[in-house]
Amino acid sequence: MSASPADLIITGCTVLVHDEVHDEEERIAFREDAAIVVRDGVIEAVTTAAAAAELAAVERIEARGQVAMPGLVNCHTHAPMVALRGLAEDLPTEEWFNDVVWPVESNLTAKDVELGARLACAEMIRGGVTCFADHYFHMDVVADVVAECGMRAHLGEAYFSSQGPQGRERSVEFALGRRGAAGGRITTALAPHAPYTVTEADLTATAELARAHGLPVHLHAAENRDQTDTSLARHGVTPVEVLDRTGLLDTDLLIAHGTGIIERDLSLLERTGGRTAVATAPRGYLKFAWPDATPVRALRAIGVPVGLATDGAASNNSLDVWESMALTSLIQKSTEGDPRWLTSRQALHHATLQSARAVGLGGDIGTLAAGRRADLILVDLTGPHTQPVHDLAATLVHSARSADVSTTIVDGRVLMRDRELLTLDVPAVVRELDQRLPALVDRSHGRRIQEYDT
C-alpha cells in the first residue's frame, strides 16, 4: 500500500466477500473486525482493523456493529416514474398501461423527468443502491442528475417503433454521447421498449447498431406468460425467439422480467453470441397477479446471470432492492417447492456480483476486493429486529431492511453518512414536483404514447 494517506478507511466492520475462485457455487463469506482502504475511488485493500490502525487517512469511518457489503444494483427501473407512485393501483396490466400510465406519460416534460430522477436517486441512495439500470425518456436529463448526485448508472433512451426512425436515432445518439460520462460512472445502452412495441425490422436494426458501436441493449421481453402465448399465437415464435432471429441474442443483452421465458427458450439463451442477463423485479409480478416467476434456477443452470430489480415505482411503488432480494429468495422457494433454494447466501450473490454482471460491470463493482471501484454500503445490525445474529446472511436478507443502511459510498465518495443524504435536497424536489403534478397526471386529452396489445 502507498505511504501517502488513503482517501478513506472504514474500520471495525464485518466485510462481505466473494469467493471468486469457486464462483459457480455462489460462495460468499464474512471477514470480521476488518477494514477497507480506499484510494482514488478504488478499493486498495480489504485488511484487518488492526493493520488499518497504523495507516494514515484523510477520512475515517468507525463501523463497529455494521456490515460492509457491495452496493446494491437495481438492474431494471424507470427512475423518473416515482412521480407516478400510487397513481395506477389494483389494475390488470393492459388497463394499467392503456388507461393510466401511457396517457400520463404523454404529458412528460424534461423537468418532470429531472425531478423524478432526483427523488428516485435519493430513495435508492438511502436504500443502499449505488448503481441502477434505467430505461426511460429524456435520458440526457437523467444523466445530468446522476453526474450531480454521485451515483453510478447504466442508461438507455427508450423508444417505440411508433415514434418512427427518430426514436431509434435518439437512442443511439444518447448512448454514444453519454457513454463514459460522469468520470466513467455512466455506461449506456440502446433501449428498444419490447418486441411487442418495436417491429422486427427495428429490432434487427438495433442489433446491427449495437454491434457496430460496441453498445449493449436493454429491453423488456417475455415479461409475462400472456405475452409469450400471444406471440406464439400471432407469429408462431416466442419473444425470446424474436430476439434470436433479429440478432439481439448476439449482442450484450439485458432482458427485463422474463417471467414468460419457457423451456424452448432456454437452449437459445444458453448459446447466445453475447453476454445475456435477465433482471427480475418480483414485487410488481405479485401486484399484477402474474402466474409465473422469473425462472432463476433454470437460467442459472445455463449460465445466465439474474440480477435484482424493482421496475418503476408506478408498478412496484418503491425502488427498494433490499425487498427484491428477500422476495426473490422467498418466491423461488415457493415456485421450486424447495426450501433449500434460493438460500440467503445465493440471494446476496444475486444482489451483488450477479447484478453487477447483469449490467456489464462485473469487473468493476459487485464485490469488495482490491482493484474494484469503491461502491459499498454499511448496514447497521444493532437494531432489535436484527438481533441476535445466528446466521449473518439470513439476518441480512430476511431481517435487515433498507432503512438499516447507514452509509452509501460510490467511487469512494460518501453520498449518505449516518442516514444523512449529502448530495440531494429532497424537500426542495418534493415541493417543486408537487406543483407540477396536476398537469402531469391529467388524462382528459385522450392521448397515449403507445398502446398495450398483447
Image (spheres, rainbow, N blue to C red):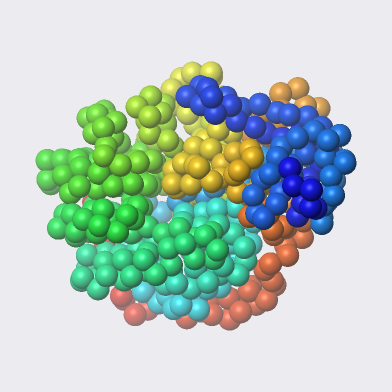
Q: How many numbered markers are drawn?
A: 0
Task: Classify 68 as above or below 428.
Answer: above
- Name the residue nearer the viewer: 258 or 249: 249
Query: Which x, y percent locates residue 350?
Result: 52, 35
Residue 22 seen anywhere in this rendered image of the structure = yes
Residue 282 seen anywhere in this rendered image of the structure = no
Using residue 200 as the reference point, say whether residue 256 is left or right of it: right
Using residue 60 as the reference point, say whether residue 272 is left or right of it: left
Q: Which residue is painted at 84% across and 44% down in the image?
A: 55
Task: Classify 374 as above or below 331.
Answer: below
Query: Which x, y percent locates residue 71?
Result: 62, 46
Task: Classify 419 as above or below 386.
Answer: below
Q: Which residue is painted at 38% across and 29% down in the image?
A: 303
Q: Which residue is painted at 18% across and 54% down in the image?
A: 204
- Name the residue nearer the viewer: 393 or 150: 150
Quadrant for the N terminus, please.
Answer: top right
Residue that sits furthest to the front in the current view: 3
- Name the residue nearer the viewer: 444 or 184: 184
Name which quarter of the figure residue 423 lies in: bottom right
Query: Which x, y percent locates residue 81?
Result: 48, 64
Using residue 104 as the reference point, say whether residue 374 is left or right of it: right
Task: Classify 131 as above or below 164.
Answer: above
Query: Which x, y percent locates residue 430?
Result: 64, 73
